Image (cartoon, coloured by chain):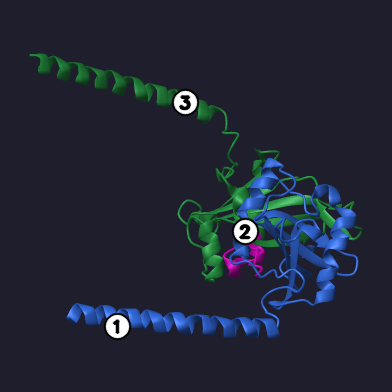
Chain colours: A green, B blue
Amino acid sequence: MRRFAVRFLLLAGFAVLSLALPAAAGAAGEKTAATPDPAVSPVFGVSIPEGYRGWQLIAVSHRTDNKDELRAILGNDIIMKAYRAKTLPFPDGSMIAKLAWKREPMKEFAGAWMPGVAPRIEFMVKDSKKYASTGGWGFGRFIDGKPADEAAHKSCFPCHQANVKDHDFVFTRYAP
Amino acid sequence: MRRFAVRFLLLAGFAVLSLALPAAAGAAGEKTAATPDPAVSPVFGVSIPEGYRGWQLIAVSHRTDNKDELRAILGNDIIMKAYRAKTLPFPDGSMIAKLAWKREPMKEFAGAWMPGVAPRIEFMVKDSKKYASTGGWGFGRFIDGKPADEAAHKSCFPCHQANVKDHDFVFTRYAP
């Protein structure tokens, strides 16, 4: 009799939980649908990957056309392995972070330039199924930790596609 | 009787080894003394640290006075921890790698510049006892994997001392 009572209470508990949980999930889901998640990029849904600042260096770059910025391009372990093995296309799970800083004169050494203000960080995330229509890549551009708008994100892939189709749509080459 | 024979042979073996090994080590030592070790820097005896290309990024820089180079400054785990905790002076065991590349136009994107030929790599190694007379830092400059000459290495510390004494003789600041 006691065993039956215990079983009944357990079953009743699960029944209450299984009724309550979908309702709670539904509420959270509705909220997400109503207001876009501020932590992910529009179009692609890419968020800032945890620990990206500790990733290894792929290369550096300098942009001088419409901005004067120094950049560091970092990669997670999956893409670093692929770069070193010269594996193309890059495997799913590959991630790239592009850190940018305004180029600023180093006050201690005339003729040397260092990172100043960081106007944005950008990411590329490889998922050949999820992002099949954009070469397998999802893009995320963040300004002060917030994603840039939809128009900005729609401009990513056409430029990569036009210029670096032969390198799996990635501009950066590994700098030994 | 058999066990005694085995023991005797083992002992004899060790005796031969212990006579032979110091002689071999001595020969290697004499060779080192006669011809400088090609793998370490003069003055400081700094070698290229294993795995440095996988270290985390401290910052990037650009040099435009007597050369046009993009640089990446990497740090081992000990100095990265110190940079992030704003610990000064940097602890013993701290190591910095400065990778340099000729700045080269990126053919796929006008107005973007990328790493070209790598003319040298440089290292700073913190050992406050060993390098007490140079602020605790040993220096190593390598060109095509070979250390630069004594004059080059004697010029390192005076410049660091004159310009960045207030930052434990290190030019590079952490770029978030």
Identified at 66% across, 68% down, the residue is A175
Label 2, label 1: how far apart the Cα atoms are: 49 Å
- Looking at the rendered image, the disc whose residue lies closer to the viewer, 3 or 1, is 1
* In this rendering, position of residue A18 left or right of residue A176: left
For label 3, the residue is A28
For label 1, the residue is B9
Disc 3 residue type?
Ala
Label 3 close to label 1 by CB (< 8 Å): no
- Looking at the rendered image, the disc whose residue lies closer to the viewer, 2 or 3, is 2
Identified at 59% across, 43% down, the residue is A48
* In this rendering, position of residue B91 left or right of residue A127: right
Please rate how many residues cluster around mark 3, counting C-alpha atoms within 10 Å: few if below 14, some from 14 to 19, many from 20. few
Identified at 66% across, 38% down, the residue is A145
Q: What residue range appears in magenta?
A: A160-176
For label 2, the residue is B55
* In this rendering, position of residue B10 left or right of residue A33: left
Subunit of label 1: B
Name the quadrant of the C terminus of chain A. bottom right
Label 2, label 3: how far apart the Cα atoms are: 41 Å
Nearer-the-camera pick, B115 or A20 = B115
Nearer-the-camera pick, A29 or B134 = B134
